[in-house]
Amino acid sequence: MQSKGNATLTWGDGQSIDLPIYGATIGPDVIDIRNLGKTGMFTYDPGFLATASCQSRITFIDGDVGLLYYRGYPIEQLAEHCDFLEVCYLLLNGELPTPTQRAEFQTNVTHHTMVHDQMLSFFKGFRRDAHPMAVMVGVVGALSAFYHDSLDITDPAHRAISANRLIAKVPTIAAMCYRYNTGLPFMYPRNDMSYAENFLYMMFATPCETYVSNPVLVRAFDRILTLHADHEQNASTSTVRLAGSSGANPFACIAAGIAALWGPAHGGANEAVLKMLAEIGDVSNVPKFIARAKDKNDSFRLMGFGHRVYKNMDPRAEVMRRTCHEVLTELGLHDDPLFKLAIELERIALEDPYFIEKKLYPNVDFYSGIVLRALGIPTSMFTAVFAMGRTVGWISQWTEMISDPEYKIGRPRQSYQGAVKRDVVPMAKRG
């Protein structure tokens, strides 16, 4: 990192310490507070909202302007000109692949799409109505029990094999979760299909009919994966890094990330959009719910509008908006009541001065939920699909951390507010 001088922290009776300032290639400078512990004090930052836990070269976000870059490439360009496996290669290796590298990478990934046959029996241990994310956490974590030939995290070749296995097998496992829920037979992966096409095949094909894919829907699903591939140091990515900092194997770390993603405040936003649309019910009810959304005394919130990080337009949203309308047109769903309702909400959010002033634009979750429903994917699978796309981001971040000579086991500190030292009173004297 480039040195940019020092910041001086002063406290008490003239005590002070100089803390180095380092510059980023783009984005805010950082103050290195590692020496602060020598003073006996620590910073207090709940949620780590003002703390950089690592250096990274993978993803950059500027929420005020509305930027999202993977390895320096704007997300809009990647979604327009690249497929998901190209984006996977970019995140893992730092550069977009040449045609030869792309072909070799696809071969390496598709070579690992099947899961060990003994893993099929795992599913029988779950109830048929088990949430797909519950199954995903367990089965992905169990991969280390079957693929322990490449678990030396200090070996770059082992890390690469594990990365390929995770990118390849998580879609297979996700599709198996859906098939198990619905009582349908598992469909083995097709290595002659593209990554997105193969997942839709494993979800919706049957052994008794020839499966014919729709290129518009395949491309839409591929874009969803690309748009969700990485998003800097969010809750699930930070979880993967923290688990990995202990030396845990990559399968366990990704399972930890899936568990963190399962939380409704993180990965469940597009599912919440569909629930909100169902609550509104009909286009005629939109004015009433818009009024409720504007009423600060009403707890109702429009889901899928605005974003915690993006204070401007979510750069992924415009790509997803175009994709959404392509899918609805392709399937003839513009007259479907739920989709008509979503389009009316979108129109109001883009035209109403209240939403414009507060920058409550439709975000990627608003459109992705609509697209996933149009593709026939049930809401219970939305977060599993999110995990599919994010797996490559998690494994890229994990690999970067393991390769960093400065990495240490994560150990956040605390400000203790509990009881001071006290003596135990024997049971007979309590009361």
Image (cartoon, rainbow, N blue to C red):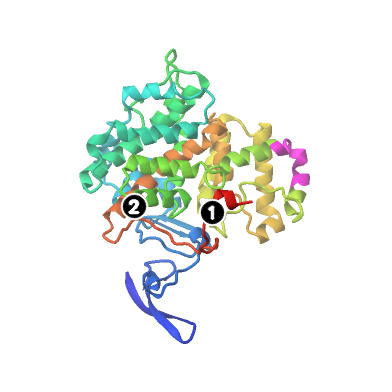
Q: Residue at x 38, y 21 (%)?
A: 121
Query: Label 2 sits on what residue type?
Result: Ser
Is residue 341 depicted above or below 406 in this figure? above
**Which residue, given by chain and number where applicable, does mark 2 sit on?**
245
Q: Residue at x 39, y 70 (%)?
A: 37
Q: Tell me where the magenta segment starts and ends, as one range.
A: 279-289
| Coordinates of residue 352 in the picture (x, y in percent) | 71, 54
| Coordinates of residue 356 in the picture (x, y in percent) | 66, 58
Asked whether the viewer can see residue 32, the reply is: no
Badge 2 local density, few (<14 within 10 Å), some, or many (20+)? some
Asked whether the viewer can see residue 307, the reply is: yes
In the image: residue 174, left or right of residue 396: right
In the image: residue 342, left or right of residue 100: right
Marks 2/1 in contact by CB < 8 Å: the verdict is no
Image quarter of residue 190: top left
In the picture as drawn, the residue positioned furthest to the top comes out as: 208
In the image: residue 357, left or right of residue 425: right
| Coordinates of residue 88 in the picture (x, y in percent) | 35, 44
Residue 314 shows which numbered tag? 1
Asked if residue 283 is among those painted magenta in the image, a careful observer would answer yes
- From the image, which quarter does the N terminus lie in? bottom left
Circle 2 SS class? loop
Label 2 – label 1 distance at C-alpha: 31 Å
Return the residue nearer the eye: 107 or 421. Answer: 421
| Coordinates of residue 365 in the picture (x, y in percent) | 56, 45
Is residue 93 depicted above or below 118 in this figure? below
Q: Residue at x 27, y 54 (%)?
A: 403
Return the residue nearer the eye: 138 or 264. Answer: 138
